[in-house]
Amino acid sequence: MSTPLAIHPLGLAVGRDAQVLHRAASPEFSGWLEHTRPAGGCARPVRLSGTIAAVDRNTGRITGQLHTDELPDRTLYKACGNRRESVCPDCAWVYQGDAYQVVCRGLTGGKGLPDSVGRHPVVFATFTAPSFGPIHHRHVPRHTCRNRQRCDCRPAPCRARSNADTCPHGQPAACFARHDANDPRLGQPLCLDCYDHAHQVVWNYFSGELWRRTKQAAERHVGATCRRRGIPKVGVVTASGKVRWVPPVRVSHGKVAEMQRRAAVHFHVLLRLDGVDPDDPDALVPPPDGITVDDLEDAIRAAARQITVTTPPHPDRPQGWLIAWGEQVDVKRINSTDGELTDAKVAAYLAKYATKATEATGHSSTRLTPATVDDYADPGGDHVARLIDACWHLGRPTHTDMTGGAATADDRQDSLDTKPNAYAGLRRWAHMLGFGGHFLTKARRYSVTFGQLRDTRTTYRREEDDEPADTISVGTLTYIGSGWLSEGDALLANTAARQRRESRRIGREELAHETWVAA
């Protein structure tokens, strides 16, 4: 493997090893390494230029000022903060840690949440998309392995049929292969022409609305259960001083979206039952007696069966598409007697998928434009290429009426003013195969926020650096670029960051060992 080259200011080609030696041998190396520490490990840090002022919190007076020209490399480095592991592993590692805390605190309490939330009824539900056509899949009817992550059990035949026939396009309608877990055919349609790619990207696009309505239906179902059992509503005083009567329970959730190999999203959701305190509506209190985890499970299953969404009309489908959940809606209980699902396991599982996107499908790209879409979209291509083409085609500007006739200028203006294209966002999210939602969301009352965790980390760093508590830093900064100035700088900064992370990990393990020995 050849060494990457960079161009020296004098025009000489400089290899990465030479860049490392030149930087490490410079007198200001220690200062440079400390200066890049906040962005150490980042794949493409943001470079900023401008002025940083120290401002007194009490008086607002500027007590000090520094320009980035006085800093090493005449720039300020900031980590990119990208959550995707395939883009920046280090920033994704930080995001994953925060995601773990957000999910876990909603299960066990802590960081400002009462420990009593750990005793609230909670379930772990998985909502999947319906079928849009037969695909290659792997199914193990009976597991005998001890570790599902390294499952070596023998799967059943993919799609065994006694009367194997062909589809209208001449492709086999059966598959007798026992697919391995890493088989590239998994998730691929048996026949690309039979598969409904348009319906799948529309389902991805409207899946967030389907989830919103499903949660509302589950809350209504639990509220109806309370009425049948004679549990009264709770009077809550609003900001205007009026009393509003609300159900005595509410459902809080933490949700992660995962992209399947077939490029359809499904949702892993933690749903927790909370009560309502009339004196403090924001307080987290247990649900009233008589409402159990069985009622929550029944409400989720009933809502998943009943709720559907019919999308707005589209020139290609005037009646719209039906958006509903698939048949496989799995609901499990946390911390049950079998020990399969615990707080820590579920939180780690959701945090891991919060750093993923479309990597499982084999596709990864930035937002597509008219200049770049042809590199990925192809109506006669593979599965992912057809999905991207469906996004781009359905999201096109619709300047014709629903009957197919040409619209006048006034008709087009009326359409823009009163009937916007509800599918226009498909082009914006074509690189995500139609899904435009956040991969990790939560109810407001479920847990702490990412902002609170970042503020706590910032405060800790200021205390670690002995910054005055009554002084804040205010920056007037301008973006000047992304990435390290050389391959050598990236190697040095990222190596130092890995060493710091390893030191922290070892320190945590030693503290845990000392605590265990003392106990």
Image (cartoon, rainbow, N blue to C red):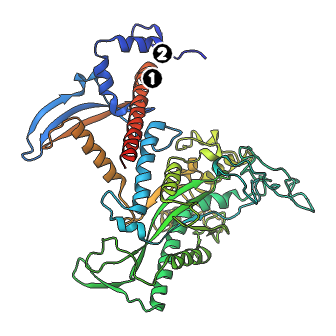
Residue located 84% across and 50% down the image: 177
Residue denoted by label 2: 16
Residue lying at the far front of the rendered structure: 518
The residue type indicated by label 1 comes to Leu
From the viewer's perspective, is 411 left or right of 146?
left
From the viewer's perspective, is 242 left or right of 156?
left
* Residue 72 picture quarter: top left
Residue 147 locus on image (x, y percent): 64, 50
Q: Would you say residue 186 is visible in this rendering?
A: yes
Residue denoted by label 1: 491
Label 1–label 2 contact, CB within 8 A: yes
Residue 120 locus on image (x, y percent): 43, 71
Quadrant where the N terminus is found in the figure: top right
- Residue at disc 1, secondary structure: helix
From the viewer's perspective, is 15 left or right of 102?
right
Residue 10 locus on image (x, y percent): 40, 7
Query: Relative to 175, is 14 above or below?
Result: above
Marks 1/2: CA–CA distance: 9 Å
The residue type indicated by label 2 comes to Arg
Query: Relative to 76, is 462 above or below?
Result: below
